[in-house]
Image (cartoon, rainbow, N blue to C red):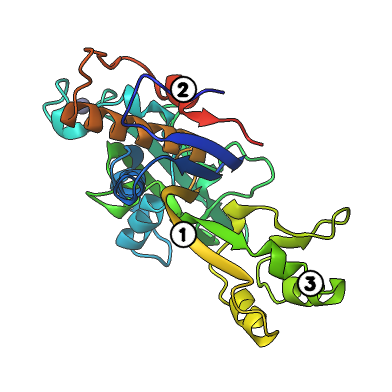
Amino acid sequence: MEGDSSDPHMPRGRILKTRDRFMKFELQGTTINFAQALSRIMTAEVPTIAVDYVVIEENTSNFSDSFLAGRLRDIPLTSRRTTSLCYSSDCPNCNGKGHCPLCSVKLRLNVKCKGKSLHVTSKDLSSSDPAVVPFDFQDTASRGTEILKLRRGQEVDLTAIARKGLGKDDSKWVPTKVVTYFALAKVRINEEMMETLTLEQKKEWVDSCHSPEFEIDPCTQKVVLSHPEEYVDDEEVIRKAEAMGKPGLVELYRRNDTFVFTVKTKGSLKASDLVMKAMDILKQRLRLANPVEDNDTPDQSAGSASHTQDFDEVD
Ligand SMILES: [Zn+2]
């Protein structure tokens, strides 16, 4: 799949691995500043929906009201609806009070323990909007995120108000669990020197590498780096070469124009959606800062899915 050649400011992306809440990808033809900005936007500037306010009607549990509110704020809520939900501070319908359907979603929790004990989880919440539910609500393999445990006769009755927000304003809106990136390794093997090693010596040298990306090609018996995008700094191979009397057998560099990202989300957004939304935000920002001379006006109405052409498919 071709990159977005119409935009001179955007790097080319290549997805290396992707699952629901995990994505590993490579950005080519970019800078450390772009990588830093993308990382920050993913954590702080992509809106999500989270519990922001809790009204407690009844709480006879062993836990305080503030503890309950904190537990609810920490549960990621599915945030596909962020484009149609107003920020409560800007809501024209309720003048910023943040309680109307245009800018908030209500989640009810009304549970009473009639047996010996009761584990209350995210699956006991009832949402006013089926698109905004706890991230594990639909996961039949999950028992849900535990909120509290009740004993016989104890009861909790509350309404949680969820609102749209940004991670830079409060951690409850942060969509990411992990964002890391590193410059892609460039490895130069001195082939002539390598061929002076016996097969046993090559195996000994390959085994000294902490990450398993160096391997011996079974056909040619040459040492190759199979997955450069997986390779992390490993000075051990250099020390091992020196110990074997072969200094300069391998040289390691970091490319300053290609970065490998690993992103894990808490569950409010799919990792791929988060990356695309962050790329869109950064793209708009760069276009505003550096207008394209041929008046290639960005399509403000386009959804995040329309920009997936910036990424090549999984290998
Ligand atoms: Zn409102």
- Looking at the rendered image, the disc whose residue lies closer to the viewer, 3 or 2, is 3
Residue at the image point whose x is 69% and y is 45% from the top: 141
Q: Is residue 57 visible?
A: no
Q: Secondary structure at mark 3?
A: helix
Cα separation, mark 1 vs mark 3, equals 24 Å
- Vertical arrangement, residue 272 with respect to residue 284, above or below: below
Q: Quarter of the image for the N terminus: give it.
A: top right
Q: Mark number for residue 254?
A: 1
Instruction: Read off the residue under disc 2.
Output: 305
- Residue 198 seen in render: yes
Describe residue 62's horizontal placement relative to residue 65 as left or right: right
Q: Is residue 164 above or below residue 94?
A: below
Between discs 1 and 3, the one toward the N terminus = 3
Secondary structure type for disc 1: strand
Disc 2 marks which amino acid?
A: Ala
Q: Nearer the viewer, residue 184 or 66?
A: 184
Q: What is the distance, in whole Å, between disc 3 and disc 2 at their CAs?
A: 47 Å
Task: For mark 2, give the secondary structure.
Answer: helix
Between disc 1 and disc 3, the foreground one is: 3
Q: Nearer the viewer, mark 1 or mark 2?
A: 1
> x, y percentage for residue 271?
50, 40
- Asked whether disc 1 touches disc 3, contact meaning CB atoms under 8 Å apart, the reply is no
Q: Earlier in the sequence, mark 1 or mark 2?
A: 1
User: For the point 20% across and 17% down, which residue is it?
Assistant: 293
Q: Nearer the viewer, residue 51 or 227?
A: 227
Q: Which residue is mark 3?
A: 202
Which kind of residue does numbered mark 1 sit on?
Arg
Tell whether circle 1 marks a residue whose Cβ is less than 8 angstroms from ligand 1.
no
- Residue 203 percent across, percent down from the top left: 81, 72
Answer with mark 3 or mark 2, whichever residue precedes in sequence.
3
